[in-house]
Image: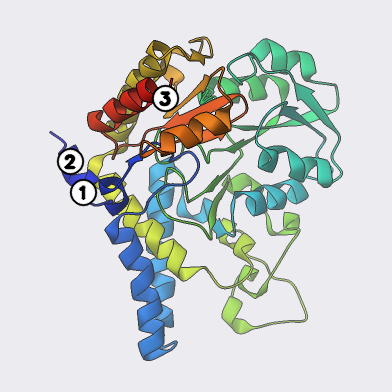
Amino acid sequence: MTDWAAYRAEFPALATQTYLNTAAGAPMSRATASAGREYYEATAADGDVHWDEWLARVEDVRELTAEMVGADASEVAFVQNASAAMNLIAARLRGEGDVLLVRGDFPSVTYPWMAGGHGVSFAEPGEGGGATDAALAAACTPETRILALGLVHYRSGFRYDLEALGQFCRERDLLLVIDATQGLGAVQVDLSAGHADFMVSSGYKWLNSGYGFGVLYGARKHMQPAAHTAAGWRSARDPYALVSDRLDLSDRAAALELGHPPFAAIFGLGAALVMQREIGHVAIENRVLQLAARMRQIVIDAGLRVAPDDAGDLRSGIVYAESEMAGVQLRDELLGQDVYVSARGDGIRCSAHYYNDEDDLDSLAAGLGAVL
């Protein structure tokens, strides 16, 4: 049986506040913070003498990341953030055809395609934030060849069925690009069946790894060197040959990293993934969905309005609730009760991860009761 209290104790921030805001930015565990700090301390003490060791550790974390999503390590790259990853993909797929997006998705999902010169069309979402197959099909044009969307909607918490999306795209000969930032680390994202062609994610939310890096997955079939639209010295098949007058690029996703890895951030991710693997990704998802279900009922009981329960078993750790009180005001009032949530639109967004517990949800209920 999982000792959730023991894992919770690894996150010092949870001892001082009711933290229901992982969807905005997550606290770090002691192990994650220590991993980054140790890198800086080693650099201060020894300079660059640990270079080879650091590169080996990066590959260890790449393996952990690939294992989590059912990919091969050759398909995983660490880049600046999810926006940078999506821009790399958009540049890579320029000329492949038009892109289908979902109106109301997070701008990091839509802007790279719009700014990159792609033809785009928008599917209209339902009240829960996600677009149905019928809505996606209606927005497709004869030129549409790419579908790009957030796997979990950043505001409502609506989660798409990845297998169903893959089937939708195969039937229409579309490439599927997903932003898993609001799901990866909380709910299972399995790429092993080939449903998605590309995936991006930031690390500072449900991966509990802080700012400064993002994860990019590109299916091996899309990693042909000739398709690279950006290159740096570490993009070469043999970077340390330092050949500068001809291109011989790697067919690994790591070629998209271009230059030096952000060691501290990657080592922090490694520590976070070791903890998540120890708990088990199935156990984490079950825990997150259980907490979110009760959180949803709490905001309903407080008189707030939530989107229709049209996502069934595909819910995430996010609950969005509209209020007659302005969202910013309600957020601030709850903060006065030491309950930390986000203001989004006309309401508040609450989000629970595996380190939250029933006491946090009781505090949310009490805070809403006091404020409303």
Amino acid tagged 2 = Ala
Label 2, residues with CA under 10 Å away: few <14, some 14-19, many ≥20: few
- Tell me the tag on residue 362: none
Callout 1: SS: loop
Q: Residue at x 61, y 38 (%)?
A: 197
For label 3, the SS is: helix
Amino acid type, mark 1: Ala
| Residue 35, position as x, y percentages in the image | 34, 66
Neighbour class for label 1 at 10 Å: few (<14), some, many (≥20)? Answer: some
Q: Are marks 3 and 2 in contact (CB under 8 Å)?
A: no
Please state which of the two labelled residues, at mark 1 or mark 3, is closer to the viewer.
Answer: 3
- Whether residue 86 appears in this view of the structure is yes
Q: Which residue is mark 3?
A: 371
Residue depicted at 70% across the width and 53% down the height? 88
- Distance between the alpha carbons at the discs numbered 3 and 2: 28 Å
Q: Which residue is mark 2?
A: 5
Mark 1 touches mark 3? (CB < 8 Å): no
Looking at the image, which is closer to me, 339 or 41? 339
In the image, residue 148 above or below residue 40? above
Which residue is labeled 1 in the image? 9
Q: Is residue 191 visible?
A: no
